[in-house]
Image: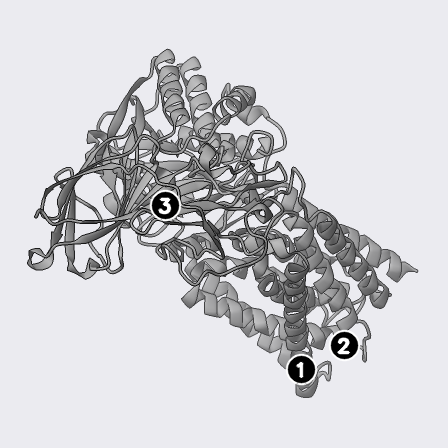
């Protein structure tokens, strides 16, 4: 009876700490730290609600309205501000007329570098309302500026504020500022606000070309109330192409910085459901805490001292805040722990607590547990996607009810673990059963020191976890509460890490996370290995897993909260007088069934230069459209004046190998490697004309294939297309609801 009671107590402690490690990550109310700054959350929410009524993508009417509202408010606050506009392009070949809003709070020490605070105000093309991405950043900055002015705040460093444009089409506004604005050369540090979902805690990412040591130290000195960060995210971010505006400053000016982004509810990202109703107030509040605390600190320090050659490992821990230490300390933790581990293992062998044979079979059991967990989760998720065919069209890998599937994954592997380790065979069964798990952790963490250094922050909580393992040598009962104490740090660090891996990478990564959940379970055997009724615990966990999976399946949609994704374009070839309906959907939704009666694949595709491959095509009645006005000046040189309905113009050429450079309005296009048929894209603003000169090898004539995108497929009565129902929304990350007009021009002056 006592053993059962102790087991229930320890299980309750583990469950409570798992909840605490997740819920502690973000604020749930405004406390004194933010109240003292005079920040009013309702004012910030008002900005988001007002400016998220319509999409604000580049070239849209509401984009201009948003820019004007920001500038007018800055003027009302009597903050120096102006608009910076100009054509700008990037290495991918994207070009637009960007319109930044720039402001400045002058510092008391003009000799010091300036601090840049920024957020982009444009929304994604074409349907996103952008409440989270990125009106949260805009609103938090505007409200913070109001509070600073009300307090008559005088920073030591100049504070430059940049509301950048055209971030969603290639960080173009930030690039325009870096290349053309005179204030750019004075910037010593950047703080950027972003979003990749509509909820969740805001994560800190560090941008630097050098080491992060001084930046981490100063961030800790800013005394953040709710820090969410670890050095693994820092290492992973450096290896992935997930750039943001602060990346431009790091790459072009060698200016380091911080950026903060929340990423949960990623299924709403870049969709019409990124709206005010789906935005988490707590996520916006988290951004507000970050800004008010970091601005106060970084506006008063010497920003030129933040570059350092050394990296620190760091992580946040409930109630303790940020913890950091050097790579040398991580190596020391692991080396000393490994030596002690070998010593205790030798002691166990000498005392007949463990034998090489038992260790070997325990290692095989652990590997089997991890492999079976991973394969079963992979198989169940694969079958789930077959049972819910519209999941094929979730390009970003994040699905409705993702957290129900995450709970299913954890519960399923835990249930499997209780069954794998349900029957002790001898007195020291938990000792030799858990020992291989620690050997695997040593392999993982020593490898991380060389291949993924940020992960080595786990060396500190792992060293404490190892103490719980050592205590088994002296205490073979459940009653040692010391074991629970030493288990908790690793447990509380791993729970949010594993959850955030799925949130960040998508549900397709569940099979990978299952391996680490299995490893974590086995590492906890010094505590849970002594539970009675492990078989019953296992079956209960399976019932919980089935409940979560079934709940997610029932809520699979469609509904107003979880609508289908659908895409449909009308593509016309003016040279051949042919037209097609095209869709990126693999699953034919009810709305698409009005066009596609079944899945088809056309023998002839009018244009195969799309960013993603269309999956559904159907011949359509040909309807002529007026082109943009293109006037040839001389060979390979022309002026294009966009049609009033055209949102973007894309240039391709099959003889791209002949192209060496492209000049736009007498300036070189930033793209220099023409290794595919795609040459450039122009995102139209105010119908601004372009003068384009294509410089070719040996002055050869270039033949261009042109595609104009007009997002007015519902507005043209000739197409007789009814609008999609509320149970469907436009698919993100692809062109949809557009009229695609294709034609060719020969740039020969004859």
Depth order, front residue of 337/223? 223
Q: Are marks 1 and 3 in contact (CB under 8 Å)?
A: no
Q: Position of residue 205 (x, y in %)?
A: 43, 46
Residue depicted at 48% across the width and 35% down the height:
714
Residue underneath mark 1? 359
Residue underneath mark 3? 214
Q: Are marks 2 and 3 in contact (CB under 8 Å)?
A: no
Query: Could you give the CA–CA distance between mark 1 and mark 3, rounded to whole angstroms?
Result: 44 Å
Disc assigned to residue 428: 2
Q: Is residue 561 left or right of residue 550?
A: left
Depth order, front residue of 529/55? 55
Query: Could you give the CA–CA distance between mark 2 and mark 3, rounded to whole angstroms?
Result: 47 Å
Q: In the rendered view, would you say 171 is above or below 448?
A: above
Task: Label 3: state its secondary structure.
Answer: helix
Task: Label 1: state its secondary structure.
Answer: helix
Of marks 2 and 3, which one's residue comes earlier in the chain? 3
Residue at the right extreme, as displayed: 1
Q: In the rendered view, would you say 124 is above or below 48?
A: below
Location of residue 163 by image quarter: top left
Crowdedness of circle 2 by 10 Å Cα count: few (<14), some, many (20+)? Answer: some
Q: Position of residue 342 (x, y in %)?
A: 58, 77
Query: Could you give the CA–CA distance between mark 1 and mark 2, rounded to whole angstroms?
Result: 11 Å
């Amino acid at each position: 009876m006592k053993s059962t009671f102790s087991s229930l107590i320890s299980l309750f402690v583990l469950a409570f700490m798992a909840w605490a490690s997740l819920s502690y990550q973000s604020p749930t109310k405004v406390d004194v730290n933010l109240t003292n700054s005079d920040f009013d959350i309702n004012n910030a929410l008002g900005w988001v609600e007002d400016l998220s009524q319509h999409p604000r993508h580049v070239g849209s009417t509401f984009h201009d309205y948003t820019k004007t509202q920001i500038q007018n408010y800055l003027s009302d606050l009597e903050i120096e501000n102006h608009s910076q506009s100009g054509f700008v392009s990037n290495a991918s070949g994207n070009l637009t007329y960007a319109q930044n809003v720039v402001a400045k709070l002058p510092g008391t020490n003009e000799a010091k570098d300036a601090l840049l605070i920024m957020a982009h105000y444009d929304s994604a093309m074409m349907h996103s309302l952008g409440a989270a991405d990125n009106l949260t950043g805009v609103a938090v900055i505007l409200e913070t500026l109001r509070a600073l002015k009300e307090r008559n705040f005088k920073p030591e460093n100049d504070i430059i504020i940049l509301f950048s444009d055209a971030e969603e089409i290639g960080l173009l506004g930030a690039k325009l500022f870096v290349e053309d604005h005179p204030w750019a050369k004075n910037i010593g540090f950047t703080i950027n606000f972003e979003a990749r979902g509509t909820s969740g805690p805001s994560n800190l990412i560090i941008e630097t070309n050098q080491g992060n040591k001084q930046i981490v130290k100063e961030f800790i000195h800013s005394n953040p109330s709710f820090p969410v960060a670890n050095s693994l995210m820092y290492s992973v971010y450096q290896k992935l192409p997930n750039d943001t505006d602060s990346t431009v400053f790091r790459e072009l000016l060698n200016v380091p910085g911080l950026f903060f982004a929340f990423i949960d509810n990623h299924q709403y990202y870049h969709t019409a459901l990124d709206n005010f109703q789906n935005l988490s107030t707590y996520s916006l509040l988290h951004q507000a805490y970050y800004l008010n605390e970091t601005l106060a600190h970084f506006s008063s320090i010497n920003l030129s001292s933040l570059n350092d050659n050394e990296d620190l490992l760091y992580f946040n821990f409930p109630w303790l805040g940020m913890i950091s230490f050097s790579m040398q300390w991580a190596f020391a933790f692991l080396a000393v722990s490994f030596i002690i581990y070998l010593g205790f293992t030798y002691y166990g062998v000498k005392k007949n607590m463990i034998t090489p044979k038992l260790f070997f079979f325990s290692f095989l059991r652990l590997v089997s547990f991890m492999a079976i967990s991973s394969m079963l989760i992979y198989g169940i998720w694969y079958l789930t996607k077959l049972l819910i065919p519209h999941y094929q069209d979730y390009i970003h890998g994040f699905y409705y009810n993702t957290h129900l599937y995450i709970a299913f994954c954890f519960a399923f592997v835990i249930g499997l673990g209780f069954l794998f380790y349900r029957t002790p065979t001898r007195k020291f069964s938990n000792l030799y059963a858990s020992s291989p798990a620690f050997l695997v952790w040593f392999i993982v963490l020593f490898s991380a020191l060389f291949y993924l250094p940020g992960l080595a922050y786990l060396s500190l909580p792992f060293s404490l976890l190892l103490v719980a393992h050592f205590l088994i040598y002296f205490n073979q009962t459940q009653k040692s509460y010391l074991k629970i104490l030493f288990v908790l740090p690793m447990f509380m660090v791993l729970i949010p890490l594993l959850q955030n891996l799925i949130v960040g990478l998508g549900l397709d990564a569940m099979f990978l996370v299952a391996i680490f959940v299995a490893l974590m379970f086995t590492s906890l055997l010094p505590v849970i290995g002594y539970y009675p009724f492990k078989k019953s615990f296992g079956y209960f966990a399976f019932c919980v897993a089935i409940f979560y999976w079934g709940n997610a399946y029932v809520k699979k949609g469609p509904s107003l909260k979880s609508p289908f994704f659908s895409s449909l374009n009308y593509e016309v070839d003016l040279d051949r007088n042919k037209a097609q309906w095209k869709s990126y959907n693999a699953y034919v939704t009810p709305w698409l069934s009005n066009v596609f009666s079944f899945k088809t694949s056309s023998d002839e595709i009018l244009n195969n230069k799309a960013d993603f491959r269309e999956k559904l095509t159907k011949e359509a009645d040909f309807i002529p459209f007026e082109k943009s006005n293109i006037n040839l000046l001389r060979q390979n040189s022309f002026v294009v004046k966009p049609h009033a309905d055209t949102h973007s113009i894309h240039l391709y050429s099959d003889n791209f190998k002949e192209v060496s450079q492209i000049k736009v309005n007498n300036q070189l296009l930033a793209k220099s490697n023409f290794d595919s048929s795609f040459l450039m894209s122009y995102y139209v603003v105010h119908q601004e004309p372009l003068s384009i000169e294509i410089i070719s090898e040996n002055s050869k004539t270039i033949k261009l294939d042109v595609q104009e995108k007009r997002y007015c497929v519902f507005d043209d009565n000739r197409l007789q297309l009814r609008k999609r129902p509320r149970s469907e929304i436009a698919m993100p990350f692809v062109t949809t609801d557009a009229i695609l007009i294709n034609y060719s021009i020969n740039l020969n002056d004859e």
